[in-house]
Amino acid sequence: MSIHGYILIEAAVGTAQRVGESILALKHPDARVLSVDTVTGPYDVIVRLEADDLDRLGRCITQGIQRVEGVTKTNTCLSVSLG
Amino acid sequence: MSIHGYILIEAAVGTAQRVGESILALKHPDARVLSVDTVTGPYDVIVRLEADDLDRLGRCITQGIQRVEGVTKTNTCLSVSLG
Amino acid sequence: MSIHGYILIEAAVGTAQRVGESILALKHPDARVLSVDTVTGPYDVIVRLEADDLDRLGRCITQGIQRVEGVTKTNTCLSVSLG
Amino acid sequence: MSIHGYILIEAAVGTAQRVGESILALKHPDARVLSVDTVTGPYDVIVRLEADDLDRLGRCITQGIQRVEGVTKTNTCLSVSLG
Amino acid sequence: MSIHGYILIEAAVGTAQRVGESILALKHPDARVLSVDTVTGPYDVIVRLEADDLDRLGRCITQGIQRVEGVTKTNTCLSVSLG
Amino acid sequence: MSIHGYILIEAAVGTAQRVGESILALKHPDARVLSVDTVTGPYDVIVRLEADDLDRLGRCITQGIQRVEGVTKTNTCLSVSLG
Amino acid sequence: MSIHGYILIEAAVGTAQRVGESILALKHPDARVLSVDTVTGPYDVIVRLEADDLDRLGRCITQGIQRVEGVTKTNTCLSVSLG
Amino acid sequence: MSIHGYILIEAAVGTAQRVGESILALKHPDARVLSVDTVTGPYDVIVRLEADDLDRLGRCITQGIQRVEGVTKTNTCLSVSLG
Amino acid sequence: MSIHGYILIEAAVGTAQRVGESILALKHPDARVLSVDTVTGPYDVIVRLEADDLDRLGRCITQGIQRVEGVTKTNTCLSVSLG
Amino acid sequence: MSIHGYILIEAAVGTAQRVGESILALKHPDARVLSVDTVTGPYDVIVRLEADDLDRLGRCITQGIQRVEGVTKTNTCLSVSLG
């Protein structure tokens, strides 16, 4: 059963586009980047990630996304099926 | 050219599932609900919306989503292509 | 592979003990309560939960813990092995 | 159908006037600057922008306004007709 | 010399449209409503006001706008010419 | 008709006295400094300013007070007669 | 040696004028109200108080000003001479 | 070895004195009230408590102080000897 | 009677794993590290600590954990038995 | 009549002990340091100060305590007798 999450990213002023492109180009063995959107609002970039388990998703965030230049903070929202 | 956004929703404690289901069942003429996820993290529900223009998207948020019982605050992040 | 998380709970003033006891007594089919501590600091009660997958953990939080009287806000921190 | 928004800008202390002048002088191909006001209150400069679509408006903000020296944060409020 | 300001309004969830319409319909002797926009972002409605002096502008805000049903908070940004 | 306001100033730790003295010594053509108090509480210095109009007051704040070394943030409260 | 302070008051939406008038009419034996201003900005009313000592000033705030209808929060800034 | 802490209390507007008196009159078997001060600043009342161990101190806070009418929030700072 | 607490740690972006490993490797004479989890959510690492008394626990936090490179803030929640 | 206050101090991560010791060693002519505690919770060090009047207390804070290396913010709570 795979895991799916939204990573809400704050970026240094003026870097949103470059951060978005860097994450799109990210090849991380642990997770699949489903989409990357630069956005208006309280965040600068929203990424949808999918991985086989939570540990892999976490590694992709802390060792992949958080190391992209310009990223200042990530907020993770994991999808939970309550049905 | 259509518009696409993320609606980050805060819900009253204990209502996340019901809010998610109500939004999924929402038939609003102005916008298409692409996905609804109940999530962990600073928000309770994340909705992806698509509409033909910003006014329609706005109407779906203020007259559709914000009137769902249990919704206490919505934060809108509109996707912007910077390419 | 099971999932393990910390639920940081804010409770109505004067209800910490009762909230702690109610959660300890909670029999939720989806998750195991590993420990419940009433604490000093920015939160009132910290719960460690374990479940077989994220969906079950989420259901225990939104349909179990969040419905305990006195709980005003829950913050979920999911353990991620980065090793 | 054009898009119209308010950009609420926070500037480094002592730079409001220069930021306002730089934005007024900004010639960005994607959007029209309708007005620039230095203001009292929680923000330092308020800009009204108009563009043919959201993507152009977004590019003007992230690649034009956010790169003006002294700008530390931008908050975008897009006008929505709910009529 | 007249005074011009932006009133950034937070409204109760689900009331943005009605608040906007009520302010548009406001006939206050002390100030002229230049525009009213319902918006996405951290505020719900943005009003541009003009008055002959600050006292009249203040009266229109506290005795006109703040008494509109649904308005929960107003933030005033007065335009200042630094030229 | 003159304008009168309170400037609530946050200063770098340990600089309150020097900031207060610098503002007291400020000779700005656009506004009169009515009083300067170093204070306890959420702010470090409170200044009362008077000017002939809002533009002059604004210039004194952004080009005078905000350029004093040690000032990190100013919050302006303009007096409004509602009588 | 007397004590002098600024009381920064937040008032319920729409009550600033009435709060200001009530405080102006306040006859409290322990302190002298030097001025009352309804203001724009993060606060609604600013009061300058003077008393013979801190205890009297405190009593005027907690037993006088804080009991005025519409007052939701008071922030006290006491003037300190660092000379 | 006894434990000593500061309880920083926020009280409903206008209740500081009554809260202070109620805590002073509190006879809780688990802890000794060393001092109670009504204060200016971000808190309304500061209490110094001493108990034989952390559990007793915690019980005095949650079952004694937090149940005093008018108390809206308590923040506990436990003294730690780092020598 | 020993003392047990949760240390909720915020770390510099991109350092969560290294902070977690450094704390796990910490040999502090005053306290026992019961567990270290890198986590999703408002914190980056959660540590459970046990010590013989509060002073020893405090020393381990301020002289051990807070000196680990990458740690930017620690929040301590001490377990209290209210039974 | 003397004045008595609590100074709630935030210190740079890892410096609490040194800040506490420096304040204890502080010989300031204007005020008496009654106690210095390094603490858990939202602050790092709590100091109780006493002085002959508010000005002296203020000088000890801004010219003594705020200049201690590691101090990043001070919050002053002055004791007020409401009896």
Image (cartoon, coloured by chain):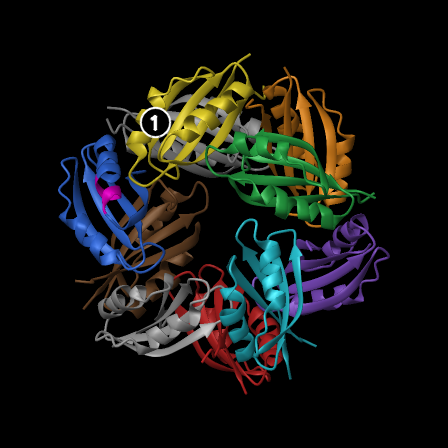
Chain colours: A blue, B brown, E red, F cyan, G purple, H orange, I yellow, J green
With J57 as the anchor, is J73 left or right in this view?
left
What residue appears at the point 57 percent right and 79 percent down from the top-left corner?
F29
Image coordinates for residue E19, horizontal then vertical, percent: 48, 70
Q: Give above or below for F76 relative to I52.
A: below
Q: Main secondary structure of the magenta part?
A: helix
With G58 as the anchor, is G75 left or right in this view?
left
What residue appears at the point 28 percent right and 39 percent down from the top-left corner?
I14
Name the image quarter holding the N terminus of chain E: bottom right
Closest to the observer, E41 or A61? A61
Q: Amino acid at mark 1?
A: Asp
Closest to the observer, H50 or F56? F56
Q: Give above or below for E21 relative to A62.
A: below
Q: Give above or below for B20 relative to F52.
A: above
Name the image quarter holding the C terminus of chain E: bottom left
- For the magenta stretch, what is the residue range? A64-68
The chain ID associated with circle 1 is: I
What residue appears at the point 55 percent right and 37 percent down from the top-left corner?
J43
Residue placed farthest to the bottom in the image?
E1
Image coordinates for residue J6, horizontal then vertical, percent: 67, 39
Callout 1: SS:
strand
Closest to the observer, I29 or B68? I29
Where, by quadrant of the figure, is residue F53 drawn? bottom right
What residue appears at the point 42 percent right and 58 percent down from the top-left corner?
B67
Residue H74 falls within the magenta-colored stretch: no
Query: Could one spot residue A18 in this view of the protein?
Result: yes
Q: In the rendered image, which residue does mark 1 sit on?
A: I37
With A77 as the anchor, is J4 left or right in this view?
right
